[in-house]
Image (cartoon, helix red, strand yellow):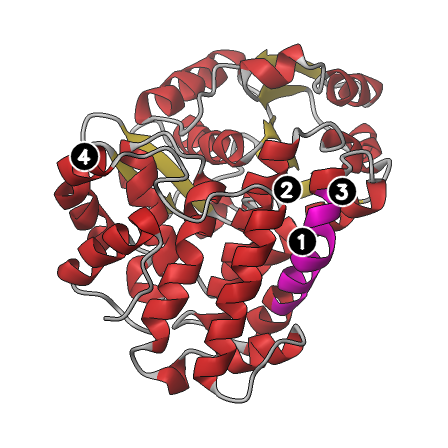
Amino acid sequence: MTFGEGALDTLTQINGKKAVIVTDAVLQQLGLLVPVQAALSLAGIESVVYSQVEPEPSIACVQNGAKAMMEEKPDWIIAVGGGSVMDAAKAMWVLYENPEVDPSAINPIETYFLRQKARFIAIPTTSGTGSEATWAIVLTDPTEKRKLGLGNRSALPDIAILDPDMVRNMPPRITADTGMDVLTHAVEGYTSAWRNDFSDGLCLKAVELVFEFLPRAYRRGEDVEARTHMQNAATIAGLGFGNSMAALAHGLGHALGADFYIPHGRAVGLFLPYTIEYAIRGEPDTTRYRPLARYLGLASETEQAAARSLVSAIRELSLEIGQPLTLTQAGIARTDLDRVIEHMAVNALMDTQTIMGSRVPEIDDIRQLFIAAMDGTPVNF
């Protein structure tokens, strides 16, 4: 992990012959690859660009990228982009080293023998997913309209480079969307069923950084201090929830994003307060909102009071950075929700993150959560 101003200079110190830079067309047009390729050139490494990664990358996207890698034969794969780019590049890496693998079947059980052909560097250009610090891979199956939660521990990047120059010009809307992704990772990582001593401190620190620095990064994109701390928060949250898992807000967000084009961070951030309200109505002693609220200086006399104060704080932050609080505000019509709610409920129930919360829902609860989020109805079930 290299972080801070000038962190891209790390690329001048690596050894190799050829790198494939995985990115998307917009980032290439914005010139964000120029300093990356310049640093590689100083290291004597040839670089070629694969810029065909799409938002919510599909299986076909990954297969096409892996095919390009097989032709170029790189010894470094460098992902420059947000979560979609980094996830797609990880899957391409798996296929490059294991051409026989079905990308939709990448899982934590198999052994993929990575690093026989190439090593992997992640350079995030958003402050959100933390994919540079996790082995998770999220792909989209456009035929079934379903997001696939995949991954393998060997797909953890070898090097992560956090340079604030790579996020300095991020637009306010993307800053807000990705920032809510960080917050959701951290809150769910702290309260998930697999929480542990090692992830707790990371998740708490990430939550603290988001509340302090996300509004500043949103309002003043040129604020290097805020950008740096939000970039760190995303990676810290990735390290945290990557070792404890996310939970129900991610299950709902994945299902929503497969049927509607709602950015991932916006979706999971929208659902987070509703899932906290849902969890606290289960077995409150298992939720751990009280120490989280206490850490943030919020009301925390009881677990229920802590959940209420945390929900209020999250919604106040969302309003401050222009995020929707309901599906209606996110531009979804009730008739459109009704048309796909059964499909989304099944996908959310099957999502690997859904079972990681302190309260695991039945399918009817998931339907009701989608409906509550439609117009902002309090969760009372």
Disc 4 marks a residue whose amino acid type is Thr
Sequence-first disc among 2 and 3:
2
Asked if disc 2 and disc 3 are in contact, CB closer than 8 Å, the reply is yes
Tell me which segment is drawn in magenta. 204-217
Asked if disc 4 and disc 1 are in contact, CB closer than 8 Å, the reply is no
Checking the image for residue 227, the label placed there is 3
Per the image, the residue denoted by label 4 is 335
- Relative image position of residue 250 (x, y in whole percent): 38, 52
Disc 1 marks a residue whose amino acid type is Ala
3D distance between C-alphas at marks 4 and 1: 38 Å
Asked if disc 2 and disc 1 are in contact, CB closer than 8 Å, the reply is yes
3D distance between C-alphas at marks 3 and 1: 10 Å
Let me know if residue 102 appears in the view. Answer: no
Quadrant into which the C terminus falls: bottom left
Sequence-first disc among 4 and 2:
2
Disc 3 marks a residue whose amino acid type is Arg
Neighbours of disc 1 within 10 Å: few (<14), some (14-19), many (20+) = many
Sequence-first disc among 2 and 1:
2
Per the image, the residue denoted by label 1 is 233
- Relative image position of residue 358 (x, y in whole percent): 35, 74
- In this rendered view, identify the residue nearer to me: 205 or 215: 215
Checking the image for residue 127, the label placed there is 2
